[in-house]
């Protein structure tokens, strides 16, 4: 079992870009004239497509890690152990952030403080759905992730975990006939459902988005031993895979299943010893990947506190101020995320997840993965 650091770095970069996208939205509400070049927005300031990367990356890693568990059958014992590990990974920090948000909202209400989006969105009637991680499934609540908005994707991710062992077992049945069939079926489902439902963050558009992209990651992992995967893990293949994703980012104005498709070759590339894998697996980006879940789930609250230190009105006054303030807030969010990772996320994962509670991708690409540089 060996951690693939390039995948970790990709997750970290995506999490940071989600924060930047939400920061941009905050500044635009204060100064609608603070516009950015469309290419800059698509490459660095669009959060939705980063979530699509999360979904396909999650399915890819889950399959590499657990394929030996569910390839031939789904036993009740292994299913429950799997769910325990996944809950240990996502729920403690989710609960901690939810309680922090509730405490902050209560403090603001008692102190009569102004809250940027108002206190009305903190509806106690929707709190049980958040606690059960079903708040994005629909039609359980009228608004997406009102308590901690980024948690909508964690809700969909939890649904994917519940279904994953059975879908993986089915995929292996299909794979017996032809390895690419599972991939083709998943791509067809993703494209067709994206035509029917525009990707969203609640209800059918969120559920189909998460499940099809998660499933795509699973199907791509099942093709990891093919000749195409070996070529993608080479130097030239990795550069072309990275170029494809960047080109798609630059050309596509909004998110959709196409983003997950464009990301898929890069996942196979990052399993190899190549320039792209080494860059994304570098120590700074690997560390960012380690704390990426804390960055993603905590940045909304962390930045709200940070606005008391760095005035959003000042940042919204010019592009230079926006960049300088954004860098300061980025450091702030990373610092607080490091604390929640070390004090909440990692200890809880180890304590409640059992032995080897931090799964790593198995070396299923012996001819391409090589050794970590």
Image: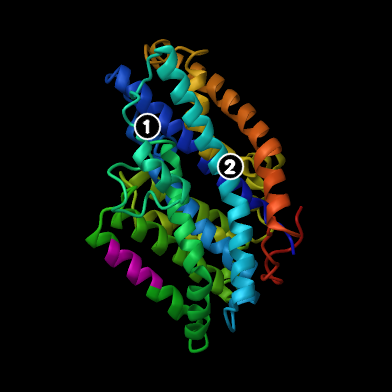
Residue 56 lies left or right of residue 224; in this view the side is left
Q: Residue furthest left?
A: 196
For the stretch drawn in magenta, the main secondary structure is helix
Identify the coloring: rainbow
97 in magenta: no
Q: Which residue is mark 2?
A: 93
Q: Residue at x 47, y 46 (%)?
A: 131
Q: How many marks?
A: 2
Residue under the point 51% across and 17% down: 324
**Camera-nearest residue between 150 and 79:** 79
Crowding near pointer 1: few (<14 within 10 Å), some, many (20+)? some
In the rendering, at what x and y percent does residue 121 appear? 33, 31
- Give x and y (percent) for residue 232: 57, 64
Please give the label number shown on residue 122. Answer: 1
Q: Nearer the viewer, residue 49 or 230?
A: 49
* Residue 143 falls left or right of residue 310: left
Span colored in magenta:
186-193
**Residue 13, image x and y in percent?**
55, 41
Q: Is residue 167 visible?
A: yes
Q: In the figure, residue 23 lies in which quadrant? A: top left
């Amino acid at each position: 079992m060996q951690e693939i650091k390039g995948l970790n770095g990709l997750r970290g970069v995506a999490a940071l870009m989600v924060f930047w996208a939400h920061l941009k939205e905050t500044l635009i509400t204060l100064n609608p004239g603070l516009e950015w070049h469309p290419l800059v927005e698509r490459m660095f300031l669009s959060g939705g497509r980063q979530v699509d990367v999360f979904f396909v990356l999650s399915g890819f890693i889950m399959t590499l890690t657990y394929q030996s568990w569910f390839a031939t059958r789904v036993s009740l014992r292994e299913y429950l152990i799997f769910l325990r590990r996944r809950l240990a990974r996502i729920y403690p920090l989710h609960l901690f952030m939810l309680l922090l948000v509730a405490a902050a909202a209560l403090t603001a209400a008692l102190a009569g403080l102004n809250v940027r989006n108002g206190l009305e969105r903190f509806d106690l009637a929707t709190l049980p759905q958040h606690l059960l991680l079903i708040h994005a499934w629909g039609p359980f609540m009228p608004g997406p992730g009102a308590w901690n908005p980024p948690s909508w994707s964690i809700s969909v991710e939890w649904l994917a975990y519940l279904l994953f062992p059975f879908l993986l077992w089915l995929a292996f049945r299909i794979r017996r006939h032809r390895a690419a069939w599972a991939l083709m079926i998943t791509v067809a489902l993703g494209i067709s459902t994206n035509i029917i439902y525009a990707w969203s963050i609640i209800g059918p558009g969120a559920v189909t988005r998460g499940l099809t992209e998660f499933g795509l990651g699973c199907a791509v992992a099942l093709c990891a031993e093919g000749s195409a995967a070996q070529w993608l893990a080479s130097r030239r293949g990795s550069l072309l895979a990275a170029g494809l994703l960047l080109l798609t980012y630059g050309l596509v104005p909004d998110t959709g299943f196409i983003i997950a498709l464009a990301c898929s070759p890069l996942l196979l590339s990052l399993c190899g010893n190549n320039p792209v894998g080494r860059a994304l697996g570098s120590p700074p980006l690997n560390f960012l990947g380690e704390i990426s879940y804390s960055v993603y789930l905590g940045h909304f609250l962390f930045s709200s506190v940070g606005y008391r230190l760095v005035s959003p009105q000042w940042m919204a006054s010019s592009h230079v101020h926006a960049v300088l303030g954004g860098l300061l807030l980025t450091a702030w969010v990373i610092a607080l995320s490091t604390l929640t990772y070390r004090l909440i996320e990692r200890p809880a994962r180890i304590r409640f997840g059992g032995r080897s509670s931090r799964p790593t991708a198995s070396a299923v690409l012996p001819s391409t993965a090589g050794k970590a540089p």
